[in-house]
Structure formats: structure tokens, C-alpha cells
Amino acid sequence: MKRALLICPGRGSYGAAELGTLKRLPHRERWQDALTAADGWCESNGMRAISALDTEPRFRPSLHLRSDVASTLIFAHTYLDFLAQQDDEISPVAVVGNSLGWYSALAVSGAVSFLDGLRMVATTGAYQQGQSGADVARLGGQLIYPILSGDWAAPSHHEVVSDALTEANRVGFAALSIDLGGLCVLCGDEPGLAALVAHLPEMQRGTVRYPMVLSGHSGFHSPLMTEMASHAQAECADITLQAPQLPLIDGHGDVWRPIHADPQSLFDYTFGRQITQPFDFAQAVRTAVSEYAPDVLVLLGPGRSLGGALGQILCSMGWRQLRNKADFTVLQRSDSPILLTSPTAA
């Protein structure tokens, strides 16, 4: 039995390649009841059912990438994938989530029920879509930019990013949103984001050109989301959280431990600092790997968009003598890969 660190992905993990994931997810008997419950909850709240969205004849960005739709799709798929992978070969030792994945991690760890977690992400997603009286333009946006060299061996763009943030804050607001290790997600209001795009040197990595503005994303994990945090806290005030059943590592690298975690403090973090302050996913992974020494990392679905970021974080730690992208690639192609992904990943 392998000790596993479970990783829950965030926004951007459900794209065209993930359409029809449920048809490919094994062990339907383990997760069908949860899907039925999620579909029922969505329909009773005026939303499209998860199963209906996943079985659309084609991927439609105008539908599938809407904040409210994307949030519920990703949350539900992550939890269903978790249920599908329960077997005697994997023994979870801790849970980490990236951004939206924090809510998934709450459910996977047992700190919140599946349907209450679904309600959380539906509430924040609807606000970002402007369905709760929010001024969407004031919520800002995000872009992603590399801070490691192409072979993951050394930092190369920290100063460039720092300079761009300084220039952007002369004309608007801009800040670090998420630290992914080898990549950073930056956020800003409209003038701040435009200034970041103007001051960050363009570069090509594989088929991706940076800086890459993330369509449909708000200025997550920054003061731009203060009003949303207050709205979500009020809307979800009756949701009951409890100490997790598995160690849960948050976006500040702090560990919420079984039995000992205070439910009210966990609620306050989820609807406070987690929304309005930078999310340090890299530190969360480093803490989890260092404290719980997993044999493998299991990246839950949908997709595998965090695979590269996780490899970069492990290389930066020198974990198992990993130093660069080539080392990680060799290990992944061996008989004992360090990172396992969902069986539905394209």
C-alpha cells in the first residue's frame, strides 16, 4: 500500500479534453450516488446538472468556462474521482488543494460534506459571474507567467516579475495571486492587468505563449475579492465545518489536523484569508511532502494541468534527488512514477 498525498486542482482544469470525463471514470458504483445528489442539488437551485454539462455534445467555452459552471464542474469531478480511487493500493496521508481546489480538499478531507462544499463553490462562482449584484469589472483578472528556466533547474524571472508588479501598481492594482512554484499567477484590476501584460517580456514555452491572460478569471486571492469574501461568508454562515479526517494543508502552508483543528477557525480562514490573500500552493505542497513523506502524489481529476507545477516544486526541493525537468521525466516514465493522475486524464 502506497502512502499518498492527494492534490485537488483548481480553475482551468476542466477544458475540452475533459468533456465526457464521467463516461471514463471507473467504479461507477462508488460515486453514482454522489453524482445523483449533486445533479439534484444543482437542478433544485436553478443550475444545469453536472452530468448534463459533462455530456454536452461539444465543449463550449461560453458555457463550460463560466465561473459558476466551471466551479461546480471541477469541484464535483474532483470529489467523484476521489471516490472512484478508493482502494487498497493507496492510503491517503494528507490533502492539498490549489485555489478552488481548497474547497475540494475540504470535502475530500471530511471537513465539510460534499453538498455543502458544492454550495460553497456555487456561491462564489455565482458572485464572480455577477449573479449576486457584484460589479464583475471590479473583480479584476489573472494572468500566468513562468519564474523558472525552461529546464526547471534555476529561477530566471523573479526580478522581471517584481519590476512588472511595481510598474503596474503605478497605474492600478496588481499583486501575486498564486505561487505555483515554477509559475506565478498574478492578478490585477483592469489597468493593473494591462500594465502587467505590457511590462512582462513575451516568451514561448512549448505551445504556450506568456504572459497568458486567463479568460473568465477574477482577481482571486487578493483584496479585490474582499466584498466576495463577505458575501460568501454571509451566504454560507449556516454551513457546518468540522476538523478534517485527514491532515489538510492550506494556502499559507499551515496544517489543519484531525481532531485538533478548530471548526470556526477553519470557516474563518476559508471565507477570509483564503479569498483575500495570496495562495501559496508551492508552500502547501512542500509542507505536505516534508511532514508526511508520501510515496506518491495523486493528482485528482479533472485533467492533469497541475502536473508540471508539481514536478517543478519537487525539483526545487531536491526531493528524491530530482534536480530538473529531465530527472522528473525519467522518473515519471519509470515503473515507479512519483506523480499519479486520474484514470480519466487525457
Image (spheres, rainbow, N blue to C red):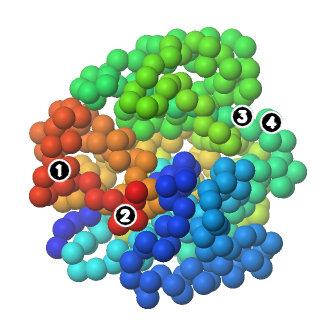
Say if 34 sits above or below 268 in the image: below
Q: Residues within 10 Å of mark 2 (few under 14, many from 20)?
A: some
Residue lying furthest right: 133
Q: Which amino acid does label 2 sit on?
A: Ser
Give yes or no for contact between labels 1 and 2 (Cβ–Cβ under 8 Å). no
Residue with the mark numbered 4: 137
The answer to whether 310 is drawn above or below residue 32 in the figure is above
Q: Rounded to the nearest whole Å, what is the CA distance between mark 1 and mark 2?
A: 16 Å
Q: Mark 2 points at which residue?
A: 342
Find out whether the residues at labels 2 and 4 contact each other: C-beta distance under 8 Å.
Answer: no
Which amino acid is tagged 4? Ala
**Considering depth in this image, is 212 or 248 the residue closer to the camera?**
212
* Badge 2 or badge 3: first in the primary sequence: 3
**Secondary structure category for the residue under label 2:** loop
Report how far apart the C-alphas of labels 2 and 4 lie in the structure: 35 Å
Rendering coords of residue 85 (x, y %): 35, 74
Q: Nearer the viewer, mark 2 or mark 3?
A: 2
Instruction: Look at 62% across and 47% down and name the residue there.
Output: 275
Tell me if label 1 and label 3 are in contact, CB under 8 Å.
no
| Local crowd size for mark 3, using a 10 Å CA cut-off: few (<14), some (14–19), many (≥20) | many
Q: Quadrant of residue 1?
A: bottom left
Q: Which of marks 1 and 4 is in front?
A: 1
Q: Is residue 326 left or right of residue 45?
A: left
Q: How far apart are marks 4 and 3 (CA)?
A: 6 Å
Residue 333 badge:
1
Amino acid identity at mark 3: Gly
Q: Determine whether the residue tagged by mark 1 lies in a helix, strand or loop.
A: loop
Q: Nearer the viewer, residue 68 or 98?
A: 68
Q: What element carries label 3?
A: loop
Q: Which mark is residue 140?
A: 3
